[in-house]
Image (cartoon, grey):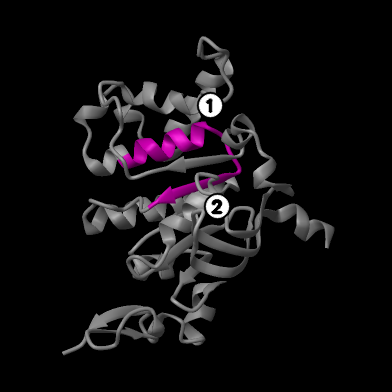
Amino acid sequence: MKQEKEHIVLKIENLSIGYSSKKSKTVVASNINIKFKKGELIGLVGANGIGKSTLLRTLTKVQEPLKGDISIKNLYLKDYTPLDLAKTLSLVLTESVASKNLSVFELIALGRQPYTNWIGNLSKEDIKITKNAISQVKIEHLKHKKCLELSDGQLQNVMIARALAQDTDLIILDEPTTHLDMYHKAYVLKLLQRLAKDTGKTILFSSHEIDLAIQLCDSIIVMTENNVIMDEPCNLISKGVFQKLFPKDLIAFDATTGSFKVKK
């Protein structure tokens, strides 16, 4: 029991997410109970507008939960200071980089900000960790380039390296394959799978690439109108969860191949 507790990185108990005002509450999803284990790659999937972004904002303390508890490494999320949270959780967004005039090395080194002094000077250890992140993502050939020179796929790899340089137990990515072609979608998710295995970090990403998530993830969180379920892909398939994700008039899930197909 103690060993299992040590391997739980994030725990969600009786969580309700949504929006509240003085007059009313809008519940997006409720009764969420899930756990993230060390070294897992976890996909978050669901139809457009189902609440994936709301869940991610709640897990990263951008948005307050309506009810329930979230704990990371046995400490409630609400009790984390911004600095301590930045040393525990790193976030990769789909938004454009503010200063693309930075070199790749400089952008990745920004991941060390929670650990640098008030001037922001990099220590030898900071430089070592930054170089290691570059090596782990295998982008040594890009480190001297300006970010404005990069393709979308290259820039996404750089942002993942910055999250690695931040050296947190938990990495959360919001739709990391947006704007990428089929090859680079698979490349990025395969990279995340390898990093979770090699580094022992827990990686959560939201995505519309359900077919790829089924193939590569250790666990998948499926959000529907009725509930939020987390399980291994094979168990979700056997339970018929993916068949209920979308209206049946246009696409259908093939449990044999683990993929969606357009109806003829």
Q: Give the numbered dot on residue 129.
A: 1
Between 142 and 172, the one nearer to me in the picture: 172
Q: Badge 2 local density, few (<14 within 10 Å), some, or many (20+)?
A: some
Mark 1 element type: helix
Three-letter code for the amino acid on which mark 2 is drawn:
Lys
Is 168 magenta? The answer is yes
Q: Is residue 37 visible?
A: yes
Question: Which quadrant would residue 259 be assigned to in this image?
Answer: bottom left
Q: Read off the magenta span.
A: 156-174
Between 137 and 41, the one nearer to me in the picture: 41
Q: Residue at x 42, y 42 (%)?
A: 92
Q: Position of residue 42 (x, y in %)?
A: 51, 60
Q: Position of residue 84 (x, y in %)?
A: 64, 33
Circles 1 and 2 in contact, beta carbons < 8 Å: no
List the residue tagged with mark 2: 197
Between 183 and 4, the one nearer to me in the picture: 4
* Residue furthest right as drawn: 2
Of the residues under marks 1 and 2, which one precedes in the sequence?
A: 1
Mark 2 element type: helix
Q: Residue at x 30, y 55 (%)?
A: 185
Q: The N terminus is located in which quarter?
A: bottom right
Q: Is residue 35 above or below residue 121?
A: below
Q: Is residue 242 above or below residue 205?
A: below
Q: The C terminus is located in which quarter?
A: bottom left
Q: Position of residue 102 (x, y in %)?
A: 30, 21
Is 204 magenta? The answer is no
Question: Which quadrant would residue 34 be assigned to in this image?
Answer: bottom right
Disc 1 versus disc 2: distance between alpha carbons? 18 Å
Q: Residue at x 76, y 60 (%)?
A: 4
